[in-house]
Structures are given as structure tokens and as C-alpha cells.
């Protein structure tokens, strides 16, 4: 598995994913604090207000700004993660690379888990880069955040990224085309995120509630449904990984 993991990390470097993925998250992390701070000036400059009109917007708190930054990560960052990982297995399956690798003494579990670990690694690094950029400007323009709230919020968000990576690789195992993987992953993630915001109580038993927990943690509010969401995320990820590895072992996978 260590050899396959090095291969995945090297391929990500050759495709510049280690550069453009963190850069996108950094751009998102910088944009939200700057937009929140300078929003009154932007509206005054481009809003076409009558002469002498006063338009006052209260400055948001640092917790709200970071929560809005996480919202940017969950929207635009979601597409970035899916696009980066959609061809992890589907692409190698269609190109015949998977046949050459699995023909060697390589276990199917090692083959999948190497991609899973590499995907989680690059996604987490990208998030940390974006969060660090956001925190830098929040520190300059707003009040500093409490480290305990920040770490707890980031923990829940990284768990959401864990679920996202696992789901994308699951679809990449079962679907033959990368475009189909991207479409299925994005639709499923958007639906579960929207359902968790609308049907709060029943959706506490799903990974989608992790986004709400992340927002609650950064705002130092009670973490309702904490263990329900954490346990369900771990169980769902284990089932998705087991199902993917089990399907990889079928002969028709490399022949499809």
C-alpha cells in the first residue's frame, strides 16, 4: 500500500493538484473575510445610492465570518474536490491502468485504500490552507477566534470532507465514466446538505449534519446530535469503503 500511496501522491503532483486545489481554497478563504469587511464600501461604490444616502451594515463577528467561509468551502470547494477525484478509479478502469496494476500481486484493498488516503490527504491539506488564509485576514480585520472553537469546528468539517472523499471514490468504483461520477456525487452531496438544513431532527443521523455541527462549534453553541452524526458518518464511510473494495474484487470490474 505504501508504494501505491506514493504513486498516487506523485500522480497528483504531476497533474498539479497539490498546487491548484490548495490555491482555490486559499482564494475562497481570503475572499470571504475581505468581502464581509469591505461590503459597505462595495455597495456604496457600485450600489448607485442617491447622493447623501447613508447605508450602514453592522460589522459581522469573526465567528460569523468563519462560518460563512465554511459555507464557501461547502459550495465551490465541493466542486473542486469532486472534479479532482472523480477519475481516480473510473479513469484507470477505462484506460486499462487498473488491469495492469491489479494483475500484479496487489490486493484490492491496498489499491482502493491508497487512493482513499491520498484523496483525504490532499483534501485536508487544501482545507487547512484555505482555513489558514481565512484566519489570517480574520485576525487582521476582525476579532481573533477562540482556538478551542476553531479546532472543534475544523474537526467536524474534516469529517465532512472524509465522507465526501469516500462517496466520490465509491461512485468512481461503480460508475465507468468520470462525468457520471461527478454528477452523481455532486447531486447526492447537495441533496444531503439541503435535507440536513431543512429536516434537522431526522437528518441528525446522517453525515450531512456535520456541516451544522461545524457552524454550531465555531459559534460556541450547544452541539445537538453530536454523537448521532459522528457515529453515522463513521459507519457509512466504513460501508462505502467495504462495498467499493468488494466490488473491485469482481472479475467484471476490470473487464468492464
Image: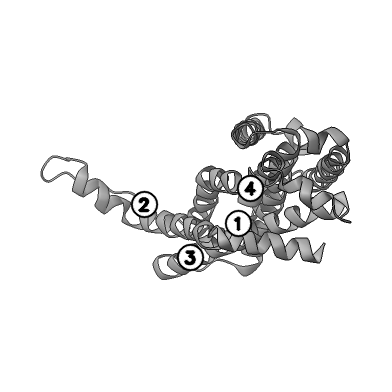
Image quadrant assignment for residue 171: top right
Question: Percent x, y for residue 248?
Answer: 84, 41
Observer-nearest residue: 1 or 148? 1
Q: Is residue 243 left or right of residue 126?
A: right
The vertical placement of 176 against 118, above or below, is above
* Disc 3 from disc 2: Cα separation: 23 Å
Observer-nearest residue: 191 or 14? 14
Q: Residue at x 63, y 43 (%)?
A: 86
* Disc 4 from disc 3: Cα separation: 24 Å
Q: Nearer the viewer, mark 2 or mark 1?
A: 1
Residue 85, which numbered label? Answer: 4
**Mark 3 vs 2, N-terminal side:** 2
Q: Nearer the viewer, mark 1 or mark 3?
A: 3
The vertical placement of 204 against 13, above or below, is above
| Crowding at mark 2 (Cα within 10 Å: few <14, some 14-19, many 20+) | few
**Mark 4 vs 3, N-terminal side:** 4
**Residue 161 is at least partly visible in this image:** yes
**Residue wearing tag 3:** 133
Q: Nearer the viewer, mark 4 or mark 2?
A: 4
**Residue wearing tag 1:** 218
* Disc 4 from disc 2: Cα separation: 40 Å
* Disc 1 from disc 4: Cα separation: 28 Å
Amino acid at each position: 500500500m505504501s508504494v501505491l500511496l506514493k504513486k498516487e501522491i506523485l500522480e497528483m503532483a504531476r497533474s498539479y493538484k497539490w498546487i491548484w486545489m490548495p490555491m482555490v481554497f486559499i482564494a475562497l478563504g481570503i475572499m470571504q473575510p475581505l468581502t464581509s469587511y469591505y461590503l459597505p464600501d462595495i455597495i456604496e461604490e457600485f450600489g448607485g445610492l442617491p447622493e447623501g444616502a447613508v447605508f450602514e451594515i453592522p460589522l459581522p463577528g469573526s465567528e460569523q465570518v468563519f462560518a460563512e467561509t465554511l459555507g464557501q468551502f461547502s459550495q465551490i470547494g465541493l466542486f473542486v474536490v469532486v472534479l479532482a477525484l472523480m477519475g481516480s478509479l473510473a479513469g484507470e478502469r477505462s484506460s486499462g491502468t487498473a488491469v495492469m496494476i491489479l494483475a500484479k500481486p496487489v490486493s484490492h484493498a491496498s489499491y482502493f485504500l491508497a487512493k482513499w488516503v491520498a484523496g483525504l490527504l490532499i483534501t485536508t491539506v487544501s482545507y487547512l490552507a484555505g482555513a489558514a488564509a481565512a484566519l489570517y485576514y480574520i485576525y487582521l480585520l476582525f476579532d481573533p477566534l477562540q482556538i478551542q472553537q476553531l479546532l472543534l469546528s475544523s474537526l467536524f468539517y474534516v469529517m465532512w470532507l472524509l465522507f465526501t472523499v469516500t462517496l466520490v471514490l465509491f461512485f468512481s468504483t461503480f460508475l465507468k465514466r468520470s462525468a457520471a461520477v461527478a454528477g452523481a456525487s455532486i447531486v447526492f452531496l447537495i441533496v444531503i446538505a439541503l435535507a440536513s438544513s431543512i429536516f434537522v431532527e431526522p437528518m441528525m443521523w446522517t453525515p450531512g449534519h456535520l456541516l451544522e455541527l461545524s457552524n454550531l462549534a465555531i459559534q460556541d453553541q450547544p452541539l445537538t446530535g453530536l454523537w448521532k452524526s459522528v457515529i453515522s458518518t463513521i459507519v457509512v464511510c466504513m460501508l462505502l469503503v467495504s462495498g467499493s473494495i468488494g466490488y473491485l474484487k469482481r472479475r467484471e470490474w476490470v473487464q468492464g
